[in-house]
Image: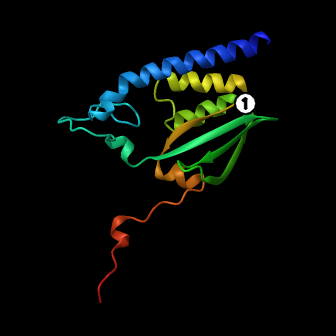
Amino acid sequence: MNERTLRLTFGRYMLAARTSQSAAKTAPRIRAGVICHSCRGPLPQPHTPGRKCCESCTNRHHVRMTFHHFHGWHCRFFSKSWKIFPKRIIFRDSASIWETARRGNGLIDAAARECLQMAIELGRGGIMLRLTNEQFQAIGGVLPPAPDALKTPRS
């Protein structure tokens, strides 16, 4: 193994260990309703048990962006159920991937930033984005109808 492969493999195991330790610390707080399960931000009092979202995460769409390097950085977008969105993007450099992750609210903590850095060094990877309605529609997502639009007028 060359040094780069060894460093990436070892770093991946170390990152997985740190991420699982971090998840072990935050999981009870998420279940207790103290922090948001999406962005890990604090929730307002009173805390009731259960997985909850904060106000900034309620109207967000969770989308996975995957990328690989082959004559540029090729990016694709997937829903939670791995449905492929029609939008594909090719970036010239990795700085654009960092910018997309930042604008898509994907860099929520140090572990996410470290995962993205390692994936870019490896040449392939993915990150979860939390997109607004406008961003979601820009990649080809279809918004569900508003609750008021579901009601049919009575004649």
Q: How many marks?
A: 1
Q: Residue at x 61, y 41 (%)?
A: 65
Residue 58 image point, x, y percent: 36, 46
Residue 49 placement, left or right of 67: left
Residue 26 image point, x, y percent: 36, 26
Q: Residue at x 75, y 14 (%)?
A: 4
The C terminus: image quadrant: bottom left
Residue 40 image point, x, y percent: 37, 31
Residue 39 placement, left or right of 106: left
Residue 22 image point, x, y percent: 43, 21
Q: Hey, what amino acid is under mark 1?
A: Asp
Residue named by callout 1: 93
Q: Residue at x 80, y 11 (%)?
A: 2
Residue 112 placement, left or right of 38: right
Which sits in the foreground, 13 or 64? Answer: 13
Say above or below: 153 vs 77. Answer: below
